[in-house]
Amino acid sequence: MERAAALAGYRVGAPLGFEQLRFIRSSSPASVALGWLARGSPAASADLTEAASMVEAWCEDTGYPESRFDEQVLAAADLLCRVGRGDTAEMGNLIARAVPPVPPRVFTDKGPELTGRVTSLRWPAGGPPAELLGPSGAPRREQSEMDAAAVFCGWCGAAIPGAGSGPGRPARYCSGRCRVAAHRARHREHVDATAGQ
């Protein structure tokens, strides 16, 4: 009870006013279908899992995809979505079995950029002290050592379990989706920087 009362001072779990609420979007089946068409047919059926994660990352990274393609691609995406019943895996299977293979589609319109992207889920500076957030029975020294050793995803800010414990370089991202999204963001920044010169 004392810990909950102390955390209340930092508004942890407190209801937010409408001014503080953020718009949260999720990818519609039509957007996923456009993602598959933008990706094109995988080279082999074994690549479907990786291709599906790339499509999901594309959907999260691309705002308003319906405004970026011509009417022919939109009609193909609508058909793919209907035949695949809006299921990501089923649409991927249909694209993989297409004869001839579906070539990747490109944007006809750059479209608007996404705004208000959350890049980290960690506390900003001035958040609650570690002893309030850690387990109630954990010694403070052990908690600070755990915090120092924690590795966070370079895209979403989530903790990466087991990072740095094995051989080789420590993981920089928590999933393939975050790795692809970060790569696309870096590529977009590079293209924007070279276009501005």
Image (cartoon, rainbow, N blue to C red):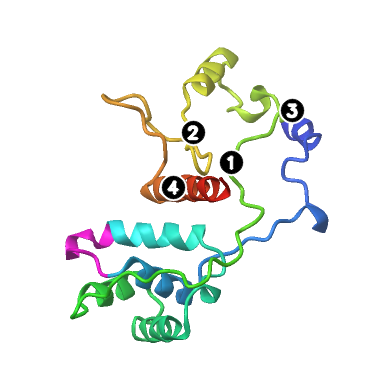
Disc 1 or disc 3, which is closer to the eye?
1
Q: Nearer the viewer, residue 190 or 194?
A: 194
Q: Secondary structure at mark 2?
A: loop
- Measure how far apart labels 3 and 4 are at the Cα level: 27 Å
Identity of the residue drawn at 61% across and 58% down = 114
- Residue type highlighted by circle 2: Phe
Task: Choose the circle earlier in sequence order: 2 or 3.
Answer: 3
- Measure how far apart labels 4 and 1 are at the Cα level: 12 Å
Disc 2 or disc 4, which is closer to the eye?
4
- Residue type highlighted by circle 1: Ser
The residue that label 2 is drawn on is: 152
Q: Secondary structure at mark 1?
A: loop
Kindly indicate whether the residue at mark 4 contacts the one at mark 3 (C-beta within 8 angstroms): no
The residue that label 3 is drawn on is: 126
Q: Is residue 43 above or below residue 29?
A: above
Q: Secondary structure at mark 3?
A: loop
Does 43 lie within the magenta span?
Answer: yes
- Measure how far apart labels 2 and 1 are at the Cα level: 9 Å
The residue that label 4 is drawn on is: 178
